[in-house]
Image: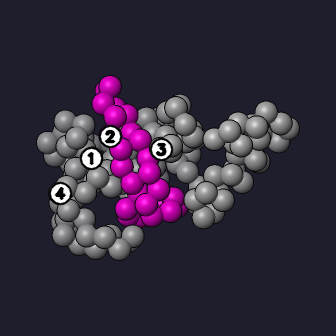
């Protein structure tokens, strides 16, 4: 993080941040506007599960009711993220690909939306939540 802080103090900050994140995540981009460190940015998220529970994810793991994973289109499988909603923070990893609806950045697996206190996909719906790359 100290090296990243030094890079941020110079000219061309955006390009350096993009390069740093790309090198860490194998060229993948974080969710639009995602902050590194302590700052959260707001993204649209939806819930999934249902018929997908028990199936293999795009990252090669089986989706279970207890898996604290999210789907993202481009972040590397295994990328750690912190999510925040209504004062609750949940740590997750990228474990699948999606969502496949424009405007949404993340799909939350059952263990994630239930950790936020929602009993079903329909109850969670589509809502904004805070996200950051975990340190």
Residue displayed at 66% across by 59% down: 23
The spot of residue 17 in percent (x, y) is 70, 46
Image-quadrant location for residue 51: bottom left
User: In this image, 50 relative to 3: left or right?
Assistant: left
Closer to the observer: label 1 or label 2? 2
Q: Residues within 10 Å of mark 3 (few under 14, many from 20)?
A: some
Residue displayed at 20% across by 62% down: 64
Give the alpha-carbon distance from disc 3 to disc 4, as whole Å. Answer: 23 Å
* Secondary structure mostly taken by the magenta-highlighted segment of the chain: strand
Residue underneath mark 4: 65
Residue underneath mark 3: 134
Q: Earlier in the sequence, mark 3 or mark 4?
A: 4
The spot of residue 20 in percent (x, y) is 68, 52
Q: How many marks?
A: 4
Image marks 3 and 2: residues in contact by CB distance under 8 Å:
no
From the image, which quarter does the N terminus lie in? top right
Q: Earlier in the sequence, mark 1 or mark 3?
A: 1
Q: Which range of residues does the magenta coloring cover?
A: 73-97
Image marks 4 and 1: residues in contact by CB distance under 8 Å:
no
Image-quadrant location for residue 114: top left
Image-quadrant location for residue 131: top left
Taking the magenta stretch, the answer to whether it contains residue 77 is: yes
């Amino acid at each position: 993080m100290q090296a990243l802080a030094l890079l941020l103090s110079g000219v061309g900050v955006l390009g350096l941040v993009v390069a740093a994140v790309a090198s860490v995540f194998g060229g993948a981009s974080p969710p639009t506007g995602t902050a590194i460190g302590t700052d959260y940015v707001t993204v649209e998220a939806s819930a999934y599960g249902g018929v997908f529970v028990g199936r293999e994810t795009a990252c090669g793991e089986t989706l279970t009711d207890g898996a604290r994973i999210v789907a993202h289109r481009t972040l590397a499988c295994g990328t750690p993220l912190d999510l925040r909603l209504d004062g609750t923070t949940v740590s997750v990893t990228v474990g699948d690909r999606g969502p496949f609806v424009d405007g949404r950045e993340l799909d939350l697996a059952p263990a994630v939306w239930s950790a936020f206190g929602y009993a079903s996909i329909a109850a969670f719906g589509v809502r904004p939540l805070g996200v950051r790359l975990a340190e």
